[in-house]
Image (spheres, rainbow, N blue to C red):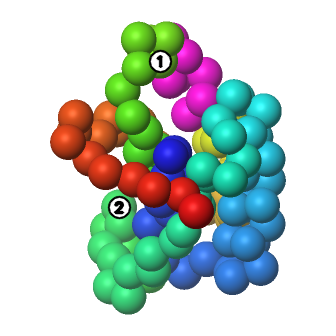
Amino acid sequence: MPHLVLTYSNLDSVAIKAFQDKSAKALAQMGFAPKSIKCYAIQTSHAHIAGEDDGSFAHLTLRMINKSDRTETVQRAWLDQLNQIASDHFPHNSTLTAEAVFLPPLYRSSTR
């Protein structure tokens, strides 16, 4: 844990890979164990963004376990950093959004 999920449309696979690599390094610097970080991307084939049928977007979801030191201020700083990384790798005419989500208390995870 954490999982960084990128949902996107019309983005270059090379840019996505570069974003994932840089984001994984940033998450490790934020204090997450490198072997626990999972970054994956889900492409949407149909999107209607701001009145454009072919508009591109990227939505980041940072999924993590709830811990007392993960305050709203900390989460905002993490999202701001990930958002900046995304801005550096994706076209400037794409819509970019991000959210932090705590997993339910009964979530099970095992990294081997």
Q: Position of residue 11 (x, y in %)?
A: 61, 77
Query: Please, what is the three-letter code of the amino acid marked with disc 2?
Result: Ala
Q: CA distance from mark 2 to mark 1?
A: 33 Å
Q: Which mark is residue 50?
A: 2
Q: Which mark is residue 94?
A: none
Q: What stretch of residues is rendered in magenta?
A: 73-80
Q: Which residue was labeled with disc 1?
A: 70
For marks 2 and 1, the one nearer the N-term is 2
Residue 77 sits above or below residue 53 on the image: above
Q: Is 100 included in the stretch rendered in magenta?
A: no
Neighbour tally class for label 2: few under 14, some 14-19, many 20 plus, Cα within 10 Å? few
Q: Position of residue 56 (x, y in %)?
A: 50, 71
Q: Position of residue 84 (x, y in %)?
A: 70, 40
User: Which residue is pictured at 43% across the width and 39% down the height?
Assistant: 64
Query: Please, what is the three-letter code of the amino acid marked with disc 1?
Result: Arg
Residue 17 sits above or below residue 25 on the image: below
Residue closer to the observer: 48 or 12 = 12
Q: Secondary structure at mark 1?
A: loop
